[in-house]
Amino acid sequence: MTREIVNYDEFLSRKEVEELNTSTYPTKINNSTLEIKNFYGIHVEEFRTIRNQNFYVNIGVNLLSGYNGTMKSTILGLFTQGFNSDFQDLFGKPLRTKYSEIFNLSLKYDGGNKIYKFEYLIEDIHSNKLKIPVFTKVRDKNDPNSDVRIITGGRNQVDGNMNLATRYINLNRLLSIHTSDAKVSDITLSEEESERQKAFYNRIFSHKAYNSFDAVANDENKKYTFGPSNGTYDYTSISSGEDNLGSIFNALLSFERLAPKKDSIRGILCIDEVEASLHPAAQINLIEYLSKWGIKNKTIVILTTHSLGLIEHISKKKNANHYYFSNLYSQKSLVDVYLNPSYETVKEEMAYMIQNEEEEKSPPKINVLCEDEVAKFIINATIKTRDITKRIEFIKTENDNGIGFPQLISFYKKTKPLFDNQSLIFLDGDIDEKVLLDKAINPKDLSTAMTIIPGGEHNLCFESWITYDLFKKSNDDPVFRKLKKPASYFKDRFHSISHVTYDIFLNDPQNDMFSKICKNFISNTPEISKKYMREFIRSTKEFEDFRNLIIEKLNFIANKKGYPDFK
Protein backbone atom coordinates (compact mmCIF):
# COMPACT_ATOMS: atom_id res chain seq x y z
CA MET A 1 0.00 0.00 0.00
CA THR A 2 1.46 3.39 -1.03
CA ARG A 3 0.66 6.93 0.06
CA GLU A 4 -2.58 8.26 -1.41
CA ILE A 5 -2.26 11.57 -3.25
CA VAL A 6 -4.77 14.08 -1.89
CA ASN A 7 -5.72 17.43 -3.39
CA TYR A 8 -7.43 19.94 -1.11
CA ASP A 9 -9.19 21.57 -4.08
CA GLU A 10 -11.19 18.39 -4.67
CA PHE A 11 -13.13 18.89 -1.44
CA LEU A 12 -16.41 20.81 -1.51
CA SER A 13 -18.48 22.55 1.14
CA ARG A 14 -21.68 20.92 2.36
CA LYS A 15 -23.73 23.45 0.42
CA GLU A 16 -21.88 22.67 -2.82
CA VAL A 17 -22.38 18.93 -2.33
CA GLU A 18 -26.08 19.46 -1.58
CA GLU A 19 -26.54 21.44 -4.81
CA LEU A 20 -24.74 18.81 -6.90
CA ASN A 21 -26.50 15.82 -5.28
CA THR A 22 -30.14 16.76 -4.74
CA SER A 23 -31.28 13.14 -5.04
CA THR A 24 -28.80 11.91 -2.43
CA TYR A 25 -29.31 14.91 -0.15
CA PRO A 26 -32.82 16.34 -0.74
CA THR A 27 -32.42 18.30 2.51
CA LYS A 28 -29.43 19.80 4.24
CA ILE A 29 -26.56 17.47 5.14
CA ASN A 30 -26.70 16.66 8.85
CA ASN A 31 -23.32 16.12 10.48
CA SER A 32 -24.66 13.64 13.01
CA THR A 33 -26.11 11.32 10.34
CA LEU A 34 -23.40 11.84 7.72
CA GLU A 35 -21.97 8.41 6.93
CA ILE A 36 -18.19 8.59 6.61
CA LYS A 37 -16.39 6.30 4.19
CA ASN A 38 -12.91 7.79 4.51
CA PHE A 39 -11.05 10.50 6.39
CA TYR A 40 -8.27 12.28 4.53
CA GLY A 41 -7.04 14.71 7.17
CA ILE A 42 -7.43 18.33 8.20
CA HIS A 43 -6.75 21.72 6.65
CA VAL A 44 -5.66 24.26 9.27
CA GLU A 45 -6.38 27.85 8.30
CA GLU A 46 -5.11 29.10 11.66
CA PHE A 47 -4.58 27.44 15.01
CA ARG A 48 -2.12 29.18 17.31
CA THR A 49 1.25 29.06 15.52
CA ILE A 50 0.13 26.94 12.54
CA ARG A 51 -1.12 28.73 9.38
CA ASN A 52 -2.54 27.42 6.08
CA GLN A 53 -1.34 23.86 6.48
CA ASN A 54 -2.76 20.58 5.18
CA PHE A 55 -2.29 17.41 7.22
CA TYR A 56 -3.18 14.43 5.02
CA VAL A 57 -3.33 10.98 6.58
CA ASN A 58 -3.57 7.43 5.26
CA ILE A 59 -5.07 4.23 6.59
CA GLY A 60 -2.26 2.72 8.63
CA VAL A 61 0.46 4.69 10.46
CA ASN A 62 1.07 8.45 10.18
CA LEU A 63 3.69 10.36 12.17
CA LEU A 64 4.07 13.86 13.65
CA SER A 65 7.56 14.70 14.94
CA GLY A 66 9.57 17.73 15.95
CA TYR A 67 10.93 19.71 18.86
CA ASN A 68 8.98 20.45 22.08
CA GLY A 69 6.50 23.30 21.86
CA THR A 70 5.91 23.04 18.11
CA MET A 71 2.21 22.09 18.31
CA LYS A 72 2.48 18.34 17.60
CA SER A 73 0.18 17.24 20.42
CA THR A 74 -2.27 20.07 19.69
CA ILE A 75 -2.58 19.09 16.02
CA LEU A 76 -2.89 15.44 17.07
CA GLY A 77 -5.82 16.43 19.27
CA LEU A 78 -7.58 18.29 16.46
CA PHE A 79 -7.93 15.02 14.54
CA THR A 80 -10.37 13.70 17.17
CA GLN A 81 -12.42 16.71 18.30
CA GLY A 82 -15.21 16.78 15.71
CA PHE A 83 -16.51 13.26 16.29
CA ASN A 84 -18.86 11.40 18.60
CA SER A 85 -19.46 7.68 18.87
CA ASP A 86 -21.87 5.36 20.68
CA PHE A 87 -19.33 2.54 20.55
CA GLN A 88 -17.48 1.60 23.73
CA ASP A 89 -14.09 0.12 24.51
CA LEU A 90 -13.48 -3.11 26.43
CA PHE A 91 -14.03 -1.29 29.75
CA GLY A 92 -17.33 0.29 28.66
CA LYS A 93 -15.83 3.73 28.01
CA PRO A 94 -16.97 5.64 24.89
CA LEU A 95 -14.74 5.57 21.82
CA ARG A 96 -14.72 9.33 21.57
CA THR A 97 -12.31 11.97 22.77
CA LYS A 98 -13.44 14.67 25.18
CA TYR A 99 -12.26 18.22 24.61
CA SER A 100 -11.16 18.48 28.26
CA GLU A 101 -8.86 15.43 27.91
CA ILE A 102 -6.61 17.30 25.49
CA PHE A 103 -7.20 21.04 25.35
CA ASN A 104 -7.01 23.83 27.85
CA LEU A 105 -7.39 26.84 25.57
CA SER A 106 -6.53 30.10 27.30
CA LEU A 107 -9.10 32.87 27.48
CA LYS A 108 -6.21 35.33 27.53
CA TYR A 109 -4.29 34.01 24.52
CA ASP A 110 -6.95 32.02 22.59
CA GLY A 111 -10.15 33.93 23.46
CA GLY A 112 -11.50 37.41 22.89
CA ASN A 113 -12.00 38.16 19.20
CA LYS A 114 -9.51 35.48 18.15
CA ILE A 115 -11.09 32.67 16.13
CA TYR A 116 -9.12 29.60 15.12
CA LYS A 117 -10.37 27.74 12.03
CA PHE A 118 -9.70 24.36 10.45
CA GLU A 119 -11.58 21.83 8.30
CA TYR A 120 -12.09 18.08 8.32
CA LEU A 121 -11.56 16.48 4.91
CA ILE A 122 -13.84 13.46 4.54
CA GLU A 123 -15.51 11.25 1.95
CA ASP A 124 -19.08 10.06 2.47
CA ILE A 125 -20.43 6.66 1.43
CA HIS A 126 -21.64 8.20 -1.85
CA SER A 127 -18.01 9.14 -2.75
CA ASN A 128 -18.59 12.86 -2.17
CA LYS A 129 -15.53 14.65 -0.81
CA LEU A 130 -16.52 17.24 1.79
CA LYS A 131 -14.74 19.81 3.92
CA ILE A 132 -16.46 20.29 7.29
CA PRO A 133 -15.60 23.62 8.98
CA VAL A 134 -14.52 23.81 12.62
CA PHE A 135 -13.79 26.93 14.67
CA THR A 136 -13.17 28.11 18.23
CA LYS A 137 -15.56 30.29 20.18
CA VAL A 138 -15.68 31.82 23.66
CA ARG A 139 -18.71 30.34 25.37
CA ASP A 140 -19.75 33.63 26.98
CA LYS A 141 -17.91 36.84 26.07
CA ASN A 142 -19.56 38.64 28.99
CA ASP A 143 -18.09 36.19 31.49
CA PRO A 144 -14.38 36.89 32.20
CA ASN A 145 -13.92 33.27 33.34
CA SER A 146 -15.69 31.65 30.40
CA ASP A 147 -13.89 28.90 28.52
CA VAL A 148 -12.98 28.59 24.84
CA ARG A 149 -14.75 25.81 22.97
CA ILE A 150 -14.28 24.03 19.63
CA ILE A 151 -17.41 24.10 17.43
CA THR A 152 -17.97 21.72 14.50
CA GLY A 153 -19.92 23.26 11.62
CA GLY A 154 -21.81 26.00 13.44
CA ARG A 155 -24.89 26.58 15.57
CA ASN A 156 -27.56 25.22 13.20
CA GLN A 157 -29.52 22.04 13.80
CA VAL A 158 -27.54 20.16 11.13
CA ASP A 159 -24.21 21.17 12.65
CA GLY A 160 -22.30 19.49 15.45
CA ASN A 161 -20.01 16.49 15.70
CA MET A 162 -19.94 13.70 13.14
CA ASN A 163 -20.19 10.01 13.93
CA LEU A 164 -16.85 8.20 13.97
CA ALA A 165 -15.00 6.23 16.65
CA THR A 166 -11.86 7.95 17.97
CA ARG A 167 -9.40 7.37 20.79
CA TYR A 168 -6.61 9.70 21.98
CA ILE A 169 -3.97 8.07 24.18
CA ASN A 170 -1.31 10.11 25.98
CA LEU A 171 1.44 7.71 27.05
CA ASN A 172 3.60 10.33 28.78
CA ARG A 173 1.77 9.98 32.09
CA LEU A 174 2.95 10.30 35.67
CA LEU A 175 1.03 7.62 37.54
CA SER A 176 1.36 4.01 36.45
CA ILE A 177 -1.36 1.49 37.22
CA HIS A 178 0.45 0.01 40.24
CA THR A 179 0.63 3.41 42.00
CA SER A 180 -3.16 3.76 41.91
CA ASP A 181 -5.96 1.89 43.66
CA ALA A 182 -6.65 -0.18 40.56
CA LYS A 183 -8.73 -3.35 40.70
CA VAL A 184 -9.08 -6.34 38.41
CA SER A 185 -12.10 -5.92 36.12
CA ASP A 186 -14.42 -8.57 34.77
CA ILE A 187 -13.57 -8.22 31.06
CA THR A 188 -14.23 -11.26 28.88
CA LEU A 189 -12.24 -11.88 25.72
CA SER A 190 -13.01 -14.63 23.25
CA GLU A 191 -10.46 -17.41 22.82
CA GLU A 192 -9.35 -15.87 19.53
CA GLU A 193 -9.00 -12.41 21.11
CA SER A 194 -6.95 -13.85 23.98
CA GLU A 195 -4.59 -15.44 21.48
CA ARG A 196 -4.23 -12.11 19.64
CA GLN A 197 -3.46 -10.42 22.95
CA LYS A 198 -0.66 -12.89 23.73
CA ALA A 199 0.71 -12.50 20.21
CA PHE A 200 0.61 -8.70 20.52
CA TYR A 201 2.63 -8.57 23.76
CA ASN A 202 5.07 -11.26 22.70
CA ARG A 203 5.62 -9.55 19.34
CA ILE A 204 6.32 -6.12 20.83
CA PHE A 205 8.63 -7.37 23.58
CA SER A 206 10.19 -10.13 21.44
CA HIS A 207 9.75 -12.99 23.88
CA LYS A 208 7.16 -15.60 24.82
CA ALA A 209 6.64 -14.77 28.50
CA TYR A 210 3.01 -13.62 28.24
CA ASN A 211 0.31 -16.29 28.44
CA SER A 212 -2.69 -14.81 30.27
CA PHE A 213 -3.85 -11.39 31.41
CA ASP A 214 -6.07 -9.58 33.88
CA ALA A 215 -7.98 -6.47 32.85
CA VAL A 216 -7.23 -3.72 35.37
CA ALA A 217 -9.08 -0.43 35.89
CA ASN A 218 -9.06 2.67 38.05
CA ASP A 219 -11.90 5.05 37.19
CA GLU A 220 -10.61 7.91 39.34
CA ASN A 221 -7.36 8.14 37.37
CA LYS A 222 -8.90 7.00 34.08
CA LYS A 223 -6.48 4.08 33.89
CA TYR A 224 -7.60 1.05 31.86
CA THR A 225 -4.99 -1.53 30.98
CA PHE A 226 -3.95 -5.17 31.25
CA GLY A 227 -1.40 -6.99 33.37
CA PRO A 228 -0.03 -10.55 33.27
CA SER A 229 -1.63 -13.23 35.43
CA ASN A 230 -0.69 -16.80 36.34
CA GLY A 231 2.98 -15.91 35.99
CA THR A 232 5.87 -14.73 38.12
CA TYR A 233 4.24 -11.30 38.70
CA ASP A 234 0.93 -9.51 38.21
CA TYR A 235 -0.33 -6.02 37.33
CA THR A 236 0.93 -4.53 40.63
CA SER A 237 4.51 -5.03 39.42
CA ILE A 238 4.30 -4.28 35.70
CA SER A 239 6.63 -1.79 34.08
CA SER A 240 5.45 1.51 32.59
CA GLY A 241 6.02 0.07 29.13
CA GLU A 242 3.75 -2.91 29.86
CA ASP A 243 1.19 -0.56 31.40
CA ASN A 244 1.19 1.63 28.28
CA LEU A 245 0.96 -1.37 26.00
CA GLY A 246 -2.18 -2.49 27.85
CA SER A 247 -3.84 0.87 27.14
CA ILE A 248 -2.97 0.51 23.46
CA PHE A 249 -4.29 -3.06 23.27
CA ASN A 250 -7.58 -1.93 24.81
CA ALA A 251 -7.95 0.56 21.95
CA LEU A 252 -6.88 -1.90 19.24
CA LEU A 253 -9.27 -4.67 20.23
CA SER A 254 -12.08 -2.14 20.77
CA PHE A 255 -11.68 -0.88 17.19
CA GLU A 256 -11.53 -4.48 15.93
CA ARG A 257 -14.92 -5.17 17.50
CA LEU A 258 -16.54 -2.40 15.46
CA ALA A 259 -18.49 -3.41 12.36
CA PRO A 260 -18.17 -0.58 9.81
CA LYS A 261 -19.98 -0.59 6.49
CA LYS A 262 -18.16 -2.15 3.58
CA ASP A 263 -15.12 -0.17 2.43
CA SER A 264 -15.54 2.37 5.28
CA ILE A 265 -12.91 3.16 7.90
CA ARG A 266 -13.39 2.05 11.50
CA GLY A 267 -12.07 5.22 13.10
CA ILE A 268 -9.04 7.27 14.17
CA LEU A 269 -6.52 6.20 16.81
CA CYS A 270 -4.11 8.88 18.08
CA ILE A 271 -1.17 8.07 20.37
CA ASP A 272 0.88 10.91 21.84
CA GLU A 273 4.58 10.15 22.46
CA VAL A 274 4.25 6.56 21.31
CA GLU A 275 7.81 5.70 22.36
CA ALA A 276 7.20 6.48 26.06
CA SER A 277 8.75 3.87 28.42
CA LEU A 278 9.58 1.46 25.59
CA HIS A 279 12.98 0.04 24.67
CA PRO A 280 14.10 1.18 21.16
CA ALA A 281 13.58 -2.34 19.78
CA ALA A 282 10.07 -2.47 21.27
CA GLN A 283 9.34 0.94 19.72
CA ILE A 284 10.14 -0.34 16.23
CA ASN A 285 8.14 -3.53 16.84
CA LEU A 286 5.13 -1.48 17.97
CA ILE A 287 5.29 0.78 14.89
CA GLU A 288 5.44 -2.22 12.58
CA TYR A 289 2.51 -3.85 14.37
CA LEU A 290 0.39 -0.68 14.26
CA SER A 291 1.19 -0.15 10.58
CA LYS A 292 -0.01 -3.61 9.57
CA TRP A 293 -2.89 -3.55 12.04
CA GLY A 294 -4.16 -0.16 10.76
CA ILE A 295 -4.20 -1.33 7.15
CA LYS A 296 -5.87 -4.65 8.01
CA ASN A 297 -8.53 -3.01 10.18
CA LYS A 298 -9.04 0.13 8.03
CA THR A 299 -8.11 2.43 10.89
CA ILE A 300 -6.14 5.65 10.68
CA VAL A 301 -3.33 5.64 13.26
CA ILE A 302 -1.61 8.96 14.02
CA LEU A 303 1.42 9.10 16.32
CA THR A 304 3.72 11.75 17.76
CA THR A 305 7.34 11.07 18.65
CA HIS A 306 10.68 12.61 19.60
CA SER A 307 12.57 9.42 18.75
CA LEU A 308 15.14 9.69 15.94
CA GLY A 309 15.06 5.90 15.66
CA LEU A 310 11.33 5.91 14.90
CA ILE A 311 11.70 8.83 12.51
CA GLU A 312 14.39 6.94 10.59
CA HIS A 313 12.23 3.81 10.48
CA ILE A 314 9.11 5.67 9.31
CA SER A 315 11.06 7.54 6.63
CA LYS A 316 11.68 4.21 4.88
CA LYS A 317 7.99 3.28 4.70
CA LYS A 318 6.13 4.12 1.49
CA ASN A 319 2.65 4.19 2.98
CA ALA A 320 3.22 6.51 5.96
CA ASN A 321 2.92 10.29 5.95
CA HIS A 322 5.46 12.00 8.21
CA TYR A 323 5.03 15.66 9.22
CA TYR A 324 8.05 17.33 10.80
CA PHE A 325 7.36 20.47 12.90
CA SER A 326 10.10 23.09 13.14
CA ASN A 327 10.49 26.66 14.36
CA LEU A 328 14.22 26.88 13.65
CA TYR A 329 13.92 29.05 10.53
CA SER A 330 10.29 30.20 10.82
CA GLN A 331 9.09 33.79 10.83
CA LYS A 332 7.13 35.68 13.51
CA SER A 333 7.10 32.77 15.99
CA LEU A 334 5.18 30.55 13.56
CA VAL A 335 5.85 26.84 13.10
CA ASP A 336 6.89 25.42 9.73
CA VAL A 337 5.64 21.94 8.82
CA TYR A 338 7.44 19.68 6.34
CA LEU A 339 5.82 16.66 4.69
CA ASN A 340 7.99 13.53 4.45
CA PRO A 341 11.40 15.16 4.91
CA SER A 342 14.44 12.93 4.59
CA TYR A 343 15.81 11.41 7.77
CA GLU A 344 19.11 13.20 7.13
CA THR A 345 17.33 16.58 7.08
CA VAL A 346 15.63 15.93 10.43
CA LYS A 347 18.82 14.57 11.99
CA GLU A 348 20.88 17.58 10.87
CA GLU A 349 18.36 20.06 12.26
CA MET A 350 18.10 18.25 15.60
CA ALA A 351 21.89 18.06 15.81
CA TYR A 352 22.09 21.82 15.24
CA MET A 353 19.50 22.49 17.96
CA ILE A 354 21.33 20.24 20.42
CA GLN A 355 24.58 22.11 19.69
CA ASN A 356 22.80 25.45 20.10
CA GLU A 357 21.37 24.32 23.42
CA GLU A 358 24.81 23.33 24.68
CA GLU A 359 26.04 26.86 23.97
CA GLU A 360 23.23 28.44 26.00
CA LYS A 361 22.66 25.65 28.50
CA SER A 362 20.53 26.50 31.52
CA PRO A 363 20.58 24.48 34.77
CA PRO A 364 18.37 21.37 34.90
CA LYS A 365 14.93 21.91 36.42
CA ILE A 366 13.81 20.56 39.78
CA ASN A 367 10.56 18.60 39.71
CA VAL A 368 7.64 19.76 41.84
CA LEU A 369 4.51 17.73 42.57
CA CYS A 370 1.45 19.24 44.23
CA GLU A 371 -2.16 18.27 44.71
CA ASP A 372 -3.91 20.48 42.14
CA GLU A 373 -3.81 23.65 40.01
CA VAL A 374 -4.63 25.87 43.01
CA ALA A 375 -1.53 24.61 44.82
CA LYS A 376 0.53 25.30 41.69
CA PHE A 377 -0.86 28.85 41.60
CA ILE A 378 0.00 29.39 45.28
CA ILE A 379 3.60 28.24 44.78
CA ASN A 380 4.14 30.47 41.74
CA ALA A 381 2.48 33.46 43.41
CA THR A 382 4.60 32.96 46.53
CA ILE A 383 7.89 32.64 44.66
CA LYS A 384 7.09 35.62 42.37
CA THR A 385 10.55 35.68 40.78
CA ARG A 386 10.75 34.44 37.20
CA ASP A 387 14.40 33.44 37.66
CA ILE A 388 13.21 30.84 40.17
CA THR A 389 9.94 29.65 38.61
CA LYS A 390 11.65 28.94 35.27
CA ARG A 391 13.94 26.46 37.05
CA ILE A 392 11.15 24.29 38.46
CA GLU A 393 9.00 21.82 36.55
CA PHE A 394 5.48 21.01 37.78
CA ILE A 395 4.81 17.34 37.18
CA LYS A 396 1.45 16.82 35.49
CA THR A 397 -0.94 14.18 36.72
CA GLU A 398 -3.29 12.36 34.37
CA ASN A 399 -6.34 13.31 36.45
CA ASP A 400 -7.68 16.76 35.49
CA ASN A 401 -8.99 17.25 39.03
CA GLY A 402 -5.56 16.80 40.58
CA ILE A 403 -4.26 14.11 42.89
CA GLY A 404 -5.63 13.59 46.40
CA PHE A 405 -3.51 13.47 49.55
CA PRO A 406 -3.81 9.68 50.18
CA GLN A 407 -2.92 8.93 46.58
CA LEU A 408 -0.04 11.40 46.66
CA ILE A 409 1.46 9.75 49.75
CA SER A 410 0.93 6.28 48.28
CA PHE A 411 2.67 7.35 45.08
CA TYR A 412 5.56 8.86 47.06
CA LYS A 413 6.15 5.69 49.06
CA LYS A 414 6.19 3.49 45.98
CA THR A 415 8.44 5.79 43.95
CA LYS A 416 10.56 7.29 46.73
CA PRO A 417 13.88 7.03 44.83
CA LEU A 418 12.46 9.43 42.22
CA PHE A 419 12.11 12.12 44.89
CA ASP A 420 15.18 11.67 47.07
CA ASN A 421 17.35 14.77 46.74
CA GLN A 422 15.81 15.74 43.39
CA SER A 423 12.11 16.63 43.74
CA LEU A 424 9.73 18.48 46.06
CA ILE A 425 6.21 17.55 47.14
CA PHE A 426 3.84 20.29 48.33
CA LEU A 427 0.87 19.33 50.50
CA ASP A 428 -2.22 21.41 51.25
CA GLY A 429 -2.35 23.43 54.46
CA ASP A 430 -4.98 21.19 56.12
CA ILE A 431 -2.45 18.34 56.40
CA ASP A 432 -0.95 17.88 59.86
CA GLU A 433 2.63 16.65 60.27
CA LYS A 434 1.37 14.10 62.80
CA VAL A 435 -0.80 12.57 60.05
CA LEU A 436 2.26 12.21 57.84
CA LEU A 437 4.23 10.53 60.62
CA ASP A 438 1.28 8.20 61.24
CA LYS A 439 1.50 7.21 57.57
CA ALA A 440 5.10 6.11 58.11
CA ILE A 441 6.67 9.14 56.47
CA ASN A 442 10.27 9.55 57.64
CA PRO A 443 10.76 12.82 59.60
CA LYS A 444 13.83 13.48 57.43
CA ASP A 445 11.59 13.50 54.35
CA LEU A 446 9.44 16.21 55.94
CA SER A 447 12.49 18.45 56.16
CA THR A 448 13.76 17.76 52.64
CA ALA A 449 11.27 16.29 50.15
CA MET A 450 7.95 17.56 51.56
CA THR A 451 6.57 21.00 52.29
CA ILE A 452 3.18 21.94 53.71
CA ILE A 453 1.55 25.03 52.22
CA PRO A 454 0.54 27.60 54.90
CA GLY A 455 -2.98 27.15 56.22
CA GLY A 456 -3.40 29.98 58.75
CA GLU A 457 -4.08 29.66 62.46
CA HIS A 458 -6.56 26.81 61.87
CA ASN A 459 -4.41 24.83 59.41
CA LEU A 460 -6.87 25.05 56.53
CA CYS A 461 -6.53 24.37 52.83
CA PHE A 462 -6.02 27.59 50.87
CA GLU A 463 -9.63 27.83 49.65
CA SER A 464 -10.94 27.42 53.21
CA TRP A 465 -8.45 29.93 54.59
CA ILE A 466 -9.26 32.64 52.08
CA THR A 467 -13.00 32.04 52.59
CA TYR A 468 -12.64 32.14 56.37
CA ASP A 469 -10.62 35.34 56.16
CA LEU A 470 -13.24 36.96 53.92
CA PHE A 471 -16.15 36.13 56.23
CA LYS A 472 -14.31 37.43 59.31
CA LYS A 473 -14.11 40.91 57.80
CA SER A 474 -16.62 43.61 58.75
CA ASN A 475 -19.16 44.77 56.20
CA ASP A 476 -17.33 48.08 55.71
CA ASP A 477 -13.91 46.50 55.10
CA PRO A 478 -12.19 48.09 52.04
CA VAL A 479 -11.71 44.67 50.49
CA PHE A 480 -15.37 44.55 49.45
CA ARG A 481 -14.95 47.76 47.48
CA LYS A 482 -12.05 46.12 45.64
CA LEU A 483 -14.17 43.05 44.97
CA LYS A 484 -17.02 45.32 43.83
CA LYS A 485 -19.54 43.31 45.83
CA PRO A 486 -20.91 43.78 49.36
CA ALA A 487 -20.19 41.26 52.10
CA SER A 488 -23.79 40.06 51.93
CA TYR A 489 -23.29 38.96 48.33
CA PHE A 490 -20.55 36.48 49.28
CA LYS A 491 -22.47 35.21 52.30
CA ASP A 492 -25.57 34.60 50.19
CA ARG A 493 -23.52 32.94 47.48
CA PHE A 494 -21.84 30.67 50.01
CA HIS A 495 -25.27 29.62 51.27
CA SER A 496 -26.65 29.02 47.76
CA ILE A 497 -23.68 26.81 46.85
CA SER A 498 -23.25 24.91 50.12
CA HIS A 499 -26.79 25.05 51.62
CA VAL A 500 -25.27 25.96 54.98
CA THR A 501 -24.79 29.42 56.44
CA TYR A 502 -21.37 31.03 56.65
CA ASP A 503 -21.55 31.47 60.47
CA ILE A 504 -21.50 27.66 60.93
CA PHE A 505 -18.25 27.65 59.00
CA LEU A 506 -16.79 30.46 61.14
CA ASN A 507 -17.58 28.53 64.32
CA ASP A 508 -15.98 25.33 63.09
CA PRO A 509 -13.63 26.00 60.13
CA GLN A 510 -11.75 22.71 60.55
CA ASN A 511 -14.84 20.62 59.92
CA ASP A 512 -13.93 18.12 57.19
CA MET A 513 -16.98 18.95 55.07
CA PHE A 514 -15.98 22.61 54.68
CA SER A 515 -12.82 21.93 52.70
CA LYS A 516 -14.83 20.59 49.77
CA ILE A 517 -17.49 23.31 50.19
CA CYS A 518 -14.91 26.11 50.13
CA LYS A 519 -13.13 24.68 47.09
CA ASN A 520 -16.48 24.67 45.31
CA PHE A 521 -17.30 28.18 46.56
CA ILE A 522 -14.00 29.68 45.35
CA SER A 523 -14.09 27.96 41.95
CA ASN A 524 -17.66 29.14 41.37
CA THR A 525 -17.27 32.72 42.61
CA PRO A 526 -15.53 34.63 39.80
CA GLU A 527 -15.31 37.82 41.88
CA ILE A 528 -12.64 36.09 43.98
CA SER A 529 -10.16 36.25 41.13
CA LYS A 530 -6.57 35.12 40.93
CA LYS A 531 -5.62 38.77 41.31
CA TYR A 532 -7.37 38.88 44.70
CA MET A 533 -5.80 35.57 45.76
CA ARG A 534 -2.36 36.82 44.70
CA GLU A 535 -2.84 39.99 46.79
CA PHE A 536 -3.90 37.82 49.75
CA ILE A 537 -0.68 35.80 49.44
CA ARG A 538 1.52 38.88 49.14
CA SER A 539 -0.03 40.59 52.16
CA THR A 540 0.12 37.58 54.46
CA LYS A 541 3.26 37.16 56.59
CA GLU A 542 3.11 33.37 56.56
CA PHE A 543 3.72 33.33 52.82
CA GLU A 544 6.88 35.42 53.22
CA ASP A 545 8.23 32.70 55.50
CA PHE A 546 6.92 30.07 53.09
CA ARG A 547 8.86 31.66 50.21
CA ASN A 548 12.09 31.50 52.20
CA LEU A 549 11.38 27.87 53.04
CA ILE A 550 10.81 27.00 49.37
CA ILE A 551 14.10 28.59 48.34
CA GLU A 552 15.89 26.84 51.19
CA LYS A 553 14.60 23.43 50.10
CA LEU A 554 15.30 24.11 46.44
CA ASN A 555 18.88 25.02 47.35
CA PHE A 556 19.20 21.83 49.41
CA ILE A 557 18.38 19.81 46.28
CA ALA A 558 20.50 22.07 44.05
CA ASN A 559 23.55 21.59 46.30
CA LYS A 560 23.07 17.81 46.34
CA LYS A 561 22.85 17.73 42.54
CA GLY A 562 25.62 20.25 41.91
CA TYR A 563 23.26 22.86 40.39
CA PRO A 564 23.67 26.63 40.83
CA ASP A 565 21.98 28.14 43.89
CA PHE A 566 18.53 29.69 43.76
CA LYS A 567 18.93 33.37 44.59
Image (cartoon, grey):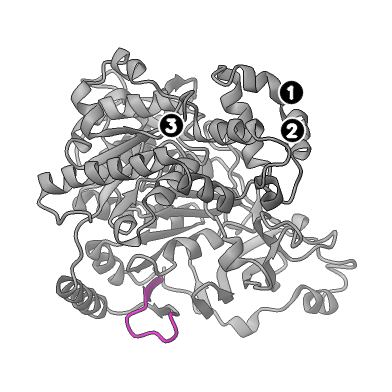
Start and end of the magenta stretch?
A: 321-333
Q: Quadrant of the N terminus?
A: bottom left
As displayed, is residue 254 above or below residue 363? above
**How many angstroms separate mark 1 from mark 3 (CA)?**
25 Å
Depth check, mark 3 against mark 2: the one in front is 2
Secondary structure beneath label 2 = helix
- Taking the spot 63% from the left edge, 36% from the top edge, the residue there is 470
Residue 475: horizontal and vertical position, in percent? 73, 37
Inspect the magenta stretch and tell me whether residue 327 lies in it. Answer: yes
Determine which residue is flagged by label 1.
501
**How many angstroms separate mark 1 from mark 2 (CA)?**
7 Å
Amino acid type at circle 1 is Thr
Q: Are marks 3 and 2 in contact (CB under 8 Å)?
A: no
User: Foreground: 304 or 434?
Assistant: 434
User: Foreground: 22 or 430?
Assistant: 430
| Number of the label disc, if any, that sits on residue 491 | 2
As displayed, is residue 544 above or below residue 46? above
- Taking the spot 71% from the left edge, 50% from the top edge, the residue there is 481
Amino acid type at circle 2 is Lys
| Number of the label disc, if any, that sits on residue 428 | 3
**How many angstroms separate mark 3 from mark 2 (CA)?**
25 Å
Q: Is disc 3 surrounded by few (<14), some (14 to 19) or many (20+) residues within 10 Å?
A: many
Q: Is disc 1 surrounded by few (<14), some (14 to 19) or many (20+) residues within 10 Å?
A: some
